[in-house]
Image (cartoon, grey):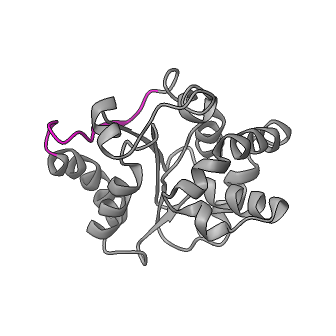
């Protein structure tokens, strides 16, 4: 496998719209043949489901099913990361042939550091922000032990993001913000 031409690490709070934004970018770049959306939570949820006898597919959607297990899944994932900070990062990049990789759910400094260490020239960071009001409109409810955990707050400070995208219904036009990111991606693809 060749190295990717560009890696976009997306982070943001629950219900900020990370999946929405990353799917738009993938579509604008021509789909999954050019751009792979990678989720650090995918292998975490898959292994967690195996070890706990749960439905892996239901842990991937935005349903209440996932929310019932979120706190324990976070704890379990932290134990794995503490033992090996790059464990989930290595799993998601195996055999990815697309020239653009989007990691839709970077949540910790160790995630950013892992990619920057291995793919220094290709890695860019994007923070998706939305007000609590917008997040509530999307179904978010503050949950102690989840919304104040490292999985939600680990990148709130200490990371200089290449782009910050405001994803509020009354905020700056999303199109204009995405175009700045897409311009850089297209330039990288032309190299």
Name the spot of residue 182 as percent of width and height, x first: 27, 55
Name the spot of residue 57 as percent of width and height, x first: 61, 70
Left or right: 185 in relation to 8: left
Task: Tell whether position 17 is magenta.
Answer: no
> Does 159 sit above or below residue 4?
above
Residue 40 visible in rendering: no
Q: Which residues are magenta?
A: 160-173
User: In the picture, residue 185 is in which quadrant?
Assistant: bottom left
Give the quadrant of the C terminus.
bottom left
> Does 109 sit above or below residue 46?
above
User: In the picture, residue 153 is in which quadrant?
Assistant: top right
Name the spot of residue 19 as percent of width and height, x first: 41, 55
> Does 184 sit above or below residue 38?
above
Tell me what residue is drawn at x 36 percent, y 75 percent.
31
Tell me what residue is drawn at x 16 percent, y 36 percent.
171
Name the spot of residue 132 as percent of width and height, x first: 34, 30
Left or right: 136 in relation to 45: left
Give the quadrant of the N terminus.
bottom right
User: In the picture, residue 133 is in which quadrant?
Assistant: top left
Residue 37 vs residue 15, the one in the foreground = 15
Residue 185 visible in rendering: yes
Magenta span dominant secondary structure: loop
Left or right: 86 in relation to 29: right
> Does 109 sit above or below residue 120?
above
Numbered disc total = 0
Task: Tell whether position 163 is magenta.
Answer: yes
Residue 102 vs residue 116, the one in the foreground = 102
């Amino acid at each position: 496998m060749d190295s990717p031409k560009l890696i976009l690490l997306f982070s943001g709070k629950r219900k900020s719209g990370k999946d929405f934004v990353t799917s738009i970018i993938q579509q604008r770049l021509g789909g999954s043949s050019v751009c792979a959306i990678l989720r650090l939570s995918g292998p975490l949820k898959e292994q967690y489901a195996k070890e706990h006898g749960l439905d892996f597919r239901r842990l991937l959607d935005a349903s209440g099913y996932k929310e019932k297990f979120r706190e324990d899944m976070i704890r379990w994932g932290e134990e794995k990361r503490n033992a090996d900070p790059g464990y989930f990062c290595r799993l998601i990049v195996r055999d990815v042939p697309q020239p653009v990789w989007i990691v839709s759910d970077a949540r910790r400094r160790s995630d950013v550091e892992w990619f920057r260490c291995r793919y220094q020239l290709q890695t860019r960071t994007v923070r998706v922000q939305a007000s609590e009001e917008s997040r509530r409109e999307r179904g978010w409810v503050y949950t102690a032990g989840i919304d104040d955990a490292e999985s939600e707050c680990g990148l709130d400070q200490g990371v200089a993001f290449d782009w910050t995208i405001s994803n509020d219904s009354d905020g700056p036009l999303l199109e204009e913000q995405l175009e700045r990111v897409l311009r850089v991606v297209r330039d990288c693809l032309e190299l």
